[in-house]
Amino acid sequence: MDKIAVFIKTCEGRPSVLWVLNSITFGLQGTNYRIYISDEEPLNDWKKHLYEELQREGHHIELHKKGMNVGVAKNQLLDCLNDEDFVLRMDDDFELGGEFRISALKTVLKSSKEIGFCADFERQVGKGRNINSGSLRPAGGYYIVAPPKLIKKFHSPFKKRRVVSGIRYSLAEHTRNLLLIKRDVFEKVRWNEQLKFMGEHSDFLMSIREAGYSGAYTPDSVHYHREDLALYRDAYTRNSAEATKRPGEEEMRNVYQERWSCDRIVTKYPVSWYILEAGRRLMAKWARD
């Protein structure tokens, strides 16, 4: 049976990690997996008890000082891997709900030596970032290096899919953040340790592209982005602005300028996405009225 390492980087003031861990129990049921968590001190009392229980069950927990660069934290988790075949990279506000299918991601990955990672679709839960709750986010596309801009160009939602063993997928260079990654990829690629937070995802995916791998995403699996859980953060932090801050803008500019001759990321969607989203919002308005 395939073995999966589940990577979660979290920090103080993120109680959403409780939902992540609970959903893993059900979303990966019947799968041989081990959880790897990187967190920062100080820990809430509930986290101390939670982590002690996870360690008793054989999972791996690392604690660091506040403010550790996300790339450093993830690479240290890589150094602690056992004999897992895949790494499932997750955010600490994701949920593996009833639409999630790890088998779909594995099927796509195993279909080609060139595919190094596979993602799925992301459903927004809770309104945030001008996205209606329940909406499916644009899933993936390709990068265009056009200094000083790195452009993330998304595919059309009507793009024709490839099919393998009944699972639909599209090749892509960038995707949503939930990734199932082949262990072999990490022989060539690691996370950039200069990046604090901002830009780490695109830099990592660009590094995978540079190493000669393709990526993919499948519509036959969906994870949930629990934006609604952000309202609980204030109860665990003294400063709510600190809990939602996305640090590392200057570091991102420096790294991207050096590696990709770019100093910012620009996102572009095809016209078909705007038409589809306008239709969804109109239908939602009619339903409310």
Image (spheres, grey):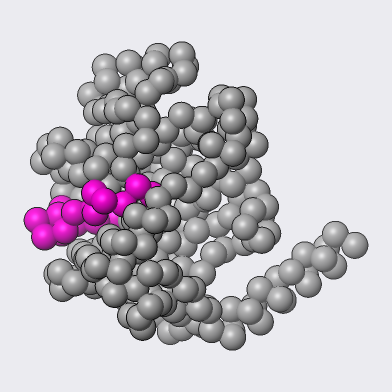
Give the residue displayed 61% in from the left and 50% down from the top: 125
* Quadrant (top left, top right, bottom left, bottom right) of the N terminus: top left
Residue 246 sits inside the magenta stretch: no
Q: Is residue 32 above or below residue 101?
A: above
Give the residue displayed 59% in from the left and 30% down from the top: 239
Percent coordinates x, y for residue 231 in the rendering? 65, 36
* Quadrant (top left, top right, bottom left, bottom right) of the C terminus: bottom right
Percent coordinates x, y for residue 22 in the rendering? 45, 32
Give the residue displayed 39% in from the left and 66% down from the top: 175
Percent coordinates x, y for residue 198 in the rendering? 41, 54
Q: Quadrant of residue 24?
A: top left
Q: Quadrant of residue 263?
A: bottom left
Magenta range: 180-198
Residue 105 at least partly seen: no
Nearer-the-camera pick, 281 or 104: 281
Q: How many marks?
A: 0
Q: Is residue 198 left or right of residue 81?
A: right
Nearer-the-camera pick, 260 or 277: 260
Q: Quadrant of residue 47?
A: top left
Residue 196 sits inside the magenta stretch: yes
Residue 149 at least partly seen: yes
Nearer-the-camera pick, 45 or 58: 45
Give the residue displayed 48% in from the left and 48% down from the top: 246
Q: Is residue 190 above or below residue 18?
A: below
Percent coordinates x, y for residue 195 in the rendering? 31, 52
